[in-house]
Image: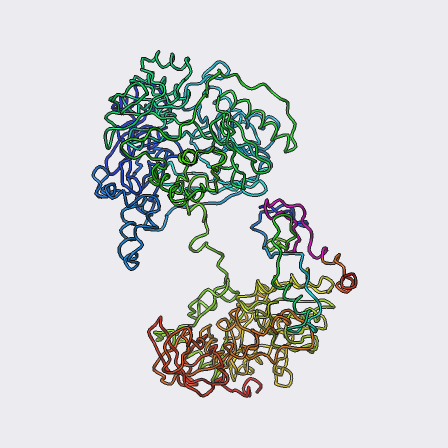
Amino acid sequence: MTRSETPSPLPFRLPAGGLIDRSTEIRFSFDGRSYAGHPGDTLASALLANGVRLVGRSFKYHRPRGLLSAGPEEPNGLVELRAGARREPNTRATVAELYDGLEATSQNRWPSLRFDLMSLNQLAAPILSAGFYYKTFMWPAALWEKLYEPMIRRAAGLGRAAEAPDPDRYEKATAHCDVLVVGGGPAGLAAALAAARTGARVILADEDFRLGGRLLAEAQTIDGRPALEWAALAEAELEAAPEVRIFRRTTVFGAYDHGAYGAVERVNDHVATPPAYEPRQRLWRFVAERCVLAAGAIERPLVFPGNDRPGVMLAGAVRTYAHRYGVAAGREAVVFSTGDDALRTARELAAGGVTVAAWVDARREPPDALREAVQELGAPFYPDGAITAVHGRTSIQAVDIRTPLFQTTLECDLVAMSGGWSPTLHLTSHLGGRPVWDEALGAYRPGAPPPGMSVAGAAAGGMTLRECLATGGRLGLEAARAAGFEGTDAPPPVAWPESAAAATLWRGPTGKGKAFVDFQNDVTDADLELAEREGYRSVEHAKRYTTLGMATDQGKTSGVNAVGILAGLRGQGMAETGTTTFRPPYTPVSFGAMGGHHRGKEFRPTRRTAAHAWAAEQGASFVESGVWLRAEWFTRPGETDWMQSCAREVATVRGAVGICDVSTLGKIDIQGPDAAALLDRLYTGTFSTLPVGRARYGLMLREDGFVFDDGTTARLGAEHYLMTTTTANAGKVMQHIEFALQWLWPELDAQAVSVTEQWAQFAVAGPRSRELLARVVAEDVSNEAVPFMAALPVTLPGGVRGRLFRISFSGELAYEIGAPSSYGEALARALMEAGRDLGVAPYGLEALNVMRIEKGHVAGGELNGQTTARDLGLQKMVSTKKDFIGRVMAQRPALVAPDRPALVGWKSADPSVRVSAGAHFLDVGAAASMENDLGYVTAAAWSAHAGGWIGLGLMKHGPERIGETVRAWDAVRGRDTPVTLCAPCFYDPQGERLRG
Amino acid sequence: MRITCPHCGERGNEEFAYLGDATVRRPDDAGAARPGAPEFERWMDYVYLRDNPAGRHRELWQHVHGCRAWLVVTRDISTHAIFSVEDARAAALARPSLVARDAAS
């Protein structure tokens, strides 16, 4: 930043005025060229000050475009802001606060903004009319993907997203208040003051970096002094009030149920790089008892030929640039208006030394006072007139003016147009409220706003400053009262009377050249005509057919004009034609803000088991399993491939003893006199008959009859069970049990609590596991003392109370041993130490998977939510003697149909050919078609024991075809492998080893 | 949305899980409900048939990131206005028994 006594004058900067710091010059670049501006500028005002009129190319026709507005409604002035990883596309230059070093690039032009080859699209305009997506490129269909779509994508478009991860931080936060005031203009300030004076907690949010709204943009007087002085006093009072929070640079973008509002605070968008530990943006949820919407109004463009040429601007924007930023948007201006409001623009221009070349008024009989006021400025006044053509391409040279009496061409470089003002009522319709057409106002007023919201000032259709101050103050006080606070009515501040008289003109006389309705999506009045002609009678259909209002600006400047044009085409009123409704967000919200800090490592919590550090020391590779990190395998020195490590681990378990951390399995402690009855209703099997000190495998169905989950549940006491679930379903099963206890059978006297995180548990598996355990556990662990499926409390080293379960997933003699989580790591180390001379080694998920496939135990691939107990060969586990969840629906004919895919084992005929899960079973010689599909491979593994690739699958009539050869057809990997079907158990089918 | 849990107070809807219709009642005659029997049809309705009234409805929610209580929320589905939030277990205990209901019908 450079401070200079006499900054070099910019070509379109007025000699004085504006809310900019003229003593400080800041530099910024646009399309690589360096320019000067001042603090207080937006990118748009600084570009205009430098005489940059051409800021973008339009979406479809690549027409040269300049700034239309000075606010969030801007359809044309979209740029890529910043560079590299911080590049943000489609940013409205009109709301981008200027900072030193700002970099901006124009969009959608090639090779350059001034010379854009794609503007040839204009020559192809006849085929790019409304609905061209649906009509022009239909045939031949094969060309769509290869030619049409890439071509259209290249030609049409918006900015480019950054290609590297966003280096900035984003936050989410919640704030509560009694009264939320949306908008910091005169109505909003009056509302916030009135509410604050009652002592209510007030949040005042404004999207601008400065409070004041329209008071910043035009010369106004309040209480006999410049309006900005009143605004400054109001701001100071609010700042000093202890229960008031002012959010500047904060857009309230959505109204949600029950007083919740979404807002995005641009904390550091006005600096190149956010300071350390500060976010770029913060997403707020405001929870408000009451809300006063004081969002102002948006001016409507007029629809006439050439109304999109750079230099045709909204009249309100022209005066904003002059008054707030000290920028002349041109040297010679023509005003084209349907109302009196643009008089303030003409005066502001004249005061700044800009020639007002003519006032063209669309009304047949405009007020005499207006005519006199315009003529005082030295401008000719043309009632009942229209602009019928704009000469010039990238800037205006002249305009054609036509009235019933004559026609003329007038040289100028600026058109200030005003088609009236539309209340910014977007938030009132977010919960379904439909705006109501007000013929006298010439605009839609808010319909029924959401509960708790009232609408003040211009947003409610009260366009004058007087109305803004009066309604703001009144509604602010009412809102505070409704939230339980007391205050006294006070007279509103005094403002001068002003005329907001305006007529509506939806469409000027047609002429040569396109007249745009939606600037951002390049929709013209002719497109709407075409849609009408082709039968799109509903506004909603016409919008979708023409894409009007569907660009990033969501039709802020085009929606009402479109309804007006369609009404005219049908010869009916606005109210009969339709309305415009809005959905959140009011303006675009970045994905960064939506995501907050939930990305990368922080996307969700990383959950490590108690023995994680021990596993890492052992060389574990971890993988996300459910919500946990689990060891997949443990790499030993010399091992170069995970399959080597896995095969060694399997050999260790099958030949000696291995240890596997199974703490992530869900553990639910269930107690109470009716615990047994509860389990009988949750599981297909019976648990009330389970003796104390024993465990049993249980299968759970959903009420629709499909398998939900499985696990081993032990009875620790007469009224005490410990259930285990799969890792993936631990949370869902807990919810299921709570539902059963609280809603289905509230009379059951039982309690359930998750103890997954309270207990660490390890599988100790292999022929030498008992030998190992005997060295760790104080109690007798002989086969007689701890038979298969025993469950008992044990004493661990140091006197720690643990639990021992004799259960086996691997098919070997095996146990699971549990300890309170805080002893989990110590227990893992104790087991390893005790088993050193037995050849103990840790094993991971991959080895576990190989061994469960060898044993034919079902897991995630088979418990996929689409299988029944019968499909999985577990029908014998389903009781017919009691009610349990899923019992009735499991009997449905389709669920017991004999041709349902059922569990089967398979073995590859050629050990060198790999088979993967997902491959489809086909008969030998059958074509790969849906009709011939027999089912698919659910699990596959290399088995040293079987000497080849083996696995499980679900196959029609699979169990009846054991011994036959079919094919495993894998289109994804390009394999087609013969496999032999077998029973789904490859290892110790009699179970002698696990009982030994 | 804001839901007032009877145990925890008013909270944002992200703390809650939604299940659905609280007006359906699980039958208790699983033994008799074989395909083809009228009891079976009642089970089919329980599992699959739901009213979708444009207006007031009773729904089951769970304060899953709070006290974990299941709740019966009476809500207007069109406007999202919430009329009452009850503890589901208390509401379930207050239901007439199925035997009594069958006798009455």
Query: Is A28 placed left or right of A711 in the picture?
Result: left
Q: Residue at x 42, y 70 (%)?
A: A619
Does the magenta run of residues contain A590?
no
Instruction: In the rendered view, tell whether residue A346 sits above or below residue A130.
Output: above
- Say if the magenta span includes residue B87: yes
On screen, residue A391 above or below A973: above
- Of residues A128 and A963, the one nearer the viewer is A128
Left or right, A994 with reference to A140: right
Determine the image quadrant of residue B101.
bottom right
Give residue A285's position: percent from left, percent from top: 52, 42
Q: Which residues are magenta?
A: B67-91
Q: How is the image coloured?
A: rainbow
Q: How many marks?
A: 0
Between residues A554 and A162, which one lies in front from this camera angle? A554
| Image position, residue A406 (x, y; %) | 28, 19
Give the quarter of the image for residue A929.
bottom left
The quarter in which the C terminus of chain A is drawn is bottom right
**At x 52% / y 36%, what residue is drawn?**
A428
Q: Is residue A837 visible?
A: no
Q: Is residue A629 visible?
A: yes
x then y, percent, for residue A745: 70, 63
User: x, y (%) of residue A626?
Assistant: 50, 64
Quarter containing the N terminus of chain A: top left
Is residue A485 shown above or below A604? Answer: above
